[in-house]
């Protein structure tokens, strides 16, 4: 197996760093490494690590046993929902089962204009509050509670386009979405796909995200509105663009 080497040792051209190259000793050539249908790839991690926001993300993700896994899971949520954030301008993002360190809300706060609310009964308020203060984070708040106990509070907020994330959340998503006000949702399943993937809705998009560096990489994007030809075409265009230009 060839090991990847830094492109810096081969060229100083900045643009080449944006490409997914790898060294293959048996060919002696630089080859494109886009991953395959079967193997995961480091695309999300590479993109995240090249950005200035990585510095602020790192203190929260470094606390994870597997930071690359956690980062790529949250980034998958951002990329899949970004079209809906852009389409609607100012909006709200509710991150359900976001864990003690509210990492998906943190990523959206740093890399989108959404108003973020992290919901988890285990959220570490002291740690997340300290992190917000340290990095001057805005558009971020939390509810330290089970989502079932927070629905009324969330639905009472001023109406605004709302996206929802369930990133490896240990939550039965369909009953929650039945009660919540929302427009688009992203779910990434881990140990309980029967609850973490929809059983009652038709996903707008679904599949295995090979850029998520964990074994649980089955995702769905759900829309809380009837689909028609026009809106479907528009969503496709946004999705393609989001994959190209994410910052
Ligand atoms: C496997 S952890 C995932 C945490 C985080 N999303 C991540 O990927 O690192 C599952 C989380 O779901 C949360 N959870 C379980 N039941 C919940 C509920 N009813 N409402 C909100 N969060 C819940 C747990 O507290 C836990 O933090």
Image: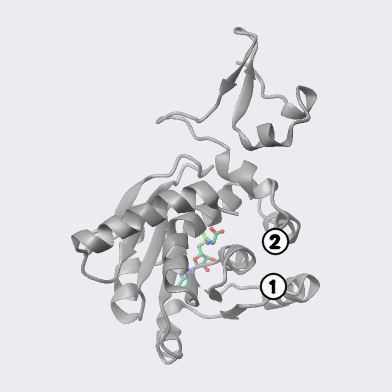
Q: Judge the density around disc 2: few (<14), some (14-19), many (≥20) Cα neighbours within 10 Å.
A: some
Left or right placement of residue 40 versus residue 11 in this view: left
Relative horizontal placement of residue 187, taking residue 129 as reference (left or right) = left
Horizontally, is 149 left or right of 134 in the view? left
Q: Residue 45 — which label?
A: none
Residue 203 visible? The answer is no
Please say if the residues under marks 2 and 1 sit with CB atoms less than 8 Å apart: yes
Alpha carbon distance from label 2 to label 1:
8 Å
Judging from the image, the colouring scheme is one colour
Helix, strand or loop at mark 2: helix
Residue 163 seen in the current view: yes
Foreground pick, 235 / 37? 235
Q: Which residue is mark 1?
A: 128
Please state, as top left, top right, bottom left or bottom right, where the C terminus lies in the image: bottom right
Q: Quadrant of the N terminus?
A: top right
What residue lies at 65% left-to-right and 10% top-to-bottom? 25
Query: In the figure, residue 204 lies in which quadrant?
Result: bottom left
**Which one is in front, 122 or 50?**
50
Looking at the rendered structure, the secondary structure element under dot 1 is helix
* Label 1 CB less than 8 angstroms from ligand 1: no
Q: Quadrant of residue 180?
A: bottom left
Q: Which residue is mark 2?
A: 60
Crowd rating for badge 1 (residues with CA inside 10 Å; few <14, some 14–19, many 20+): many
Q: With respect to residue 195, does 124 lie above or below?
A: below
Q: Residue at x 58, y 79 (%)?
A: 142
């Amino acid at each position: 197996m060839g090991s990847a080497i830094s492109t810096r040792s081969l060229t100083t051209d900045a643009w080449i760093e944006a490409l997914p190259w790898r060294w293959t000793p048996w060919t002696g050539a630089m080859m494109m490494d886009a991953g395959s249908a079967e193997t995961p790839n480091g695309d999300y991690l590479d993109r995240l690590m090249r950005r200035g926001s990585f510095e602020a993300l790192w203190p929260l993700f470094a606390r994870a046993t597997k930071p690359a896994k956690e980062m790529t899971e949250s980034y998958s949520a951002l990329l899949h929902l970004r079209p809906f954030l852009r389409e609607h301008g100012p909006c709200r993002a509710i991150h359900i089962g976001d864990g003690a360190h509210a990492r998906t809300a943190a990523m959206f706060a740093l890399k989108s204009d959404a108003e973020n609310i992290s919901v988890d009964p285990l959220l570490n308020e002291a740690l997340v509050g300290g992190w917000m203060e340290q990095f001057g984070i805005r558009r971020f708040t939390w509810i330290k509670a089970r989502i079932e106990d927070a629905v009324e509070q969330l639905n009472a907020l001023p109406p605004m386009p709302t996206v929802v994330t369930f990133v490896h959340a240990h939550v039965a998503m369909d009953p929650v979405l039945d009660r919540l006000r929302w427009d688009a949702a992203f779910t990434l399943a881990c140990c309980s796909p029967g609850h973490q993937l929809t059983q009652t809705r038709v996903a707008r998009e679904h599949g295995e995200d090979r850029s998520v560096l964990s074994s649980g990489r089955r995702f769905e994007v759900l829309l809380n509105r009837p689909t028609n030809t026009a809106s479907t075409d528009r969503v496709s265009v946004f999705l393609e663009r989001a994959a190209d230009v994410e910052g």
